[in-house]
Image: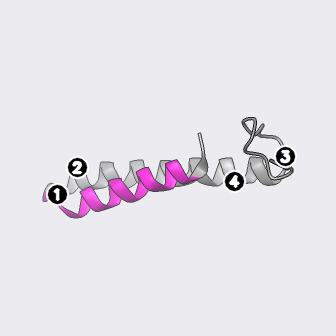
């Protein structure tokens, strides 16, 4: 999964959390958002270090 997908999911959780009144539900959504952001960071780090394979046709060194 692309890191941007995780960031988008984190933003979605944060926006939904803003609309809730129950503090426990808000906390759970914010914690989920934090997990998504950590996943996005992990994907980015793995890409930078070359340990995450790019799908064919999407690599930075692909000439097409």
Image mark for residue 20: 1
Q: Which residues are magenta?
A: 4-21
| C-alpha gap between disc 2 and disc 3 | 38 Å
Q: Secondary structure at mark 2?
A: helix
User: Residue 14: percent from the left, percent from the top?
Assistant: 34, 60
Quadrant where the N terminus sits is: top right
Q: Does the magenta run of residues contain 41? A: no
User: Residue 41: percent from the left, percent from the top?
Assistant: 63, 54
**Mark 2 or mark 3: whose residue is earlier in sequence:** 2
**Mark 1 or mark 4: whose residue is earlier in sequence:** 1
**Mark 2 or mark 4: whose residue is earlier in sequence:** 2
Question: Which residue was labeled with disc 2?
Answer: 25
Left or right of 62 on screen, residue 12: left
| C-alpha gap between disc 1 and disc 4 | 31 Å
**Mark 1 or mark 3: whose residue is earlier in sequence:** 1
User: Residue 29: percent from the left, percent from the top?
Assistant: 32, 50
Question: Which residue was labeled with disc 4?
Answer: 44
Are the residues flagged by discs 2 and 3 in contact, CB closer than 8 Å?
A: no
User: Residue 37: percent from the left, percent from the top?
Assistant: 52, 55
Considering every residue shown, the one lying at the far front of the view is 64
| C-alpha gap between disc 2 and disc 1 | 7 Å
Are there few (<14), some (14-19), or many (20+) residues within 10 Å of tag 2?
few
**Mark 3 or mark 4: whose residue is earlier in sequence:** 4
């Amino acid at each position: 999964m692309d890191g941007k997908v995780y960031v988008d999911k984190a933003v979605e959780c944060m926006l939904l959390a803003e609309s809730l009144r129950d503090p426990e539900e808000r906390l759970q959504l914010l914690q989920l958002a934090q997990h998504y952001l950590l996943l996005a960071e992990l994907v980015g780090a793995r890409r930078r270090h070359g340990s995450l394979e790019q799908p064919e046709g999407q690599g930075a060194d692909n000439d097409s």
